[in-house]
Amino acid sequence: MKNIVLIVSLLTVSLYANLSVQQIEKMVHKIHEKRVGFDLKILQSTKNPFVVMEEDNNVTKFVIPEVKEDAKISLHAIMGGKAYINDGWKDINNSVMGYTLKYIGKRGVVLRNGNHIKKLFLHEDRDSFIKIEGR
């Protein structure tokens, strides 16, 4: 097995050994050339490709969902193992705007949507921490 790998690697090296300096410089020059990309203005003006199907009275309607550009996820408080996110108390594995709440700590939470992870923290300048003391 080692002999086969050695022979294949030697053949590969010998095949690419006949490159001249000029050929290598041409390849490098092609890499450095500016490539034509997609114009951002055209991309922003495209319509949303995703639609939602609704069925009412045996009639199927295609509804294009509205995108909320200002939609943000805000952590307001943490108390008793629950987090107050946006406008409600959430527990672990609850859904928040497409994300799943995975961890609740003392000063922040972790949300996950597939491979996307968001970490939200309480503001330090506010008096966000509630302390309850007994008598």
Image (spheres, rainbow, N blue to C red):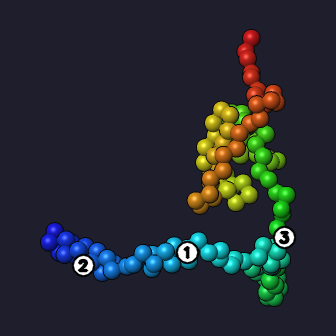
Q: Measured from the top left, where is residue 120 in percent x and y?
A: 70, 44
Q: What's the amino acid at mark 3?
A: Glu
Q: What residue lies at 81% left-to-right and 88% top-to-bottom?
A: 59
Helix or strand or loop: what does disc 3 sit on?
Answer: loop
Disc 3 and disc 1: Cα gap in Å?
Answer: 45 Å
Residue occupying the point 64% across, 40% down: 104
Q: Residue farthest to the top?
A: 135
| Residue reaching furthest to the bottom | 59
Q: Which residue is mark 1?
A: 29
Question: Is residue 54 in view?
Answer: no
The quarter of the displayed image where residue 95 is located: bottom right
Residue 26 place in picture, x, y as percent: 51, 78
Identify the mark nearer the N-term, 3 or 2.
Answer: 2
Amino acid type at image mark 1: His
Q: Nearer the viewer, residue 43 or 29?
A: 29
Q: Earlier in the sequence, mark 3 or mark 1?
A: 1
Q: Residues within 10 Å of mark 3 (few under 14, many from 20)?
A: few
Q: Which residue is mark 3?
A: 66
Instruction: Point out the frontmost of discs 3 and 2.
Output: 2
> Can residue 76 be seen in this snapshot?
yes
The answer to the question of whether label 3 and label 2 lie on touching residues, with beta carbons closer than 8 A, is: no
> Disc 2 on helix, strand or loop?
helix
Residue at the spot of label 2:
11
Q: In this picture, is 58 found above or below 111? A: below
* Quadrant housing the C terminus: top right
Count neighbours of disc 2 (C-alpha within 10 A) and say few if under 14, some if 14 to 19, many if 20 or more. Answer: few
